[in-house]
Amino acid sequence: MDEQTIEAYSAGASRYAADWRDQPAPADMYALLQRYFTLGGKTADIGCGAGRDVAWLNDHGFPTVGYDAAEGLLAQAANDFPSLVFKRDVLPALDSIVAETYDNVLCETVLMHLPPDEVTSACARLIDILRPAGTLYLSWRVGESVSARDAAGRLYAGFDAARVREGLGDAQYLLDAETVNQSSGKRVHRLIARRR
């Protein structure tokens, strides 16, 4: 994960949390999670931010642990959702997570904050932490093909979806499409894959 991006999220954690709370709920994403995730299955939200989706997943029958690289966001999440579990870990390594731990993994709009040369290994690691037949929901913002930073210093990497597919290996694709996220209004690529 890009260090400058982690620092930007930590420093602005309360502002980002407020921005995400003020956005409409991502009903489109939640419908896909209910359709494809294993109900009652052990679930991880990688790049959980301020914990909104971790709370929704837990409330809807998916016992979830939230992971994020930004200490500030984790503190905000723990403050807003004190009964839920949040831990620090960083893509692509995810050092604290043992292989084949989760039935469901959510990684919503995180990949674009990694340097492009880390995207393939990050995707391989996301598949690695799934149990056999586990399901990965993965999305990233679609933008310019050239990497750039926003005013806060967050990296928005430009990369081809082929890097993602390479990392997912022989996973079975259940969904692979570009769309507009109902919550953020941004164009995203969504890919739902099942580990064989």
Image (cartoon, rainbow, N blue to C red):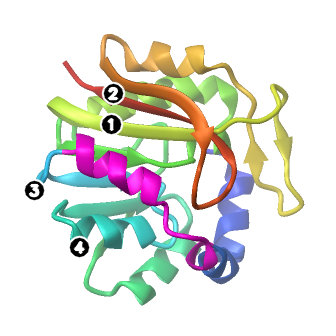
Where disc 4 sits, the SS reads helix
Marks 4 and 3, Cα distance to the nearest angstrom? 11 Å
The residue beneath circle 3 is: 40
Visible in this render: residue 46?
no
Secondary structure of residue under mark 2: strand
The answer to whether mark 2 and mark 3 are in CB contact below 8 A is: no
Question: Which quadrant would residue 162 be assigned to in this image?
Answer: top right
Q: CA distance from mark 1 to mark 2?
A: 5 Å
Kindly identify the residue that appears in the image at 64 percent across and 71 percent down.
Answer: 10
Q: Is residue 53 left or right of residue 182?
A: left
Disc 2 marks which residue? 193
110 relative to 67, above or below: above
Figure quadrant of the N terminus: top right
Instruction: Say what amino acid the circle numbered 2 marks.
Output: Ala
Question: Does the residue at mark 1 contact the one at mark 2 (Cβ under 8 Å)?
Answer: yes
On the question of residue 106 being in view, the answer is yes
Q: Which residue appears farthest toward the left when viewing the image?
A: 40
Q: Which residues are magenta?
A: 20-37
Q: CA distance from mark 2 to mark 4?
A: 23 Å
Answer whether residue 21 is magenta in the image: yes
Q: Which residue is mark 4?
A: 59
CA separation in Å, label 1 and label 4 = 19 Å
Q: Please tell me whether residue 70 is drawn above or below residue 193 in the rendered image.
A: below
As for residue 88 lying within the magenta part, the answer is no
State which tag comes first along the sequence, 4 or 3: 3
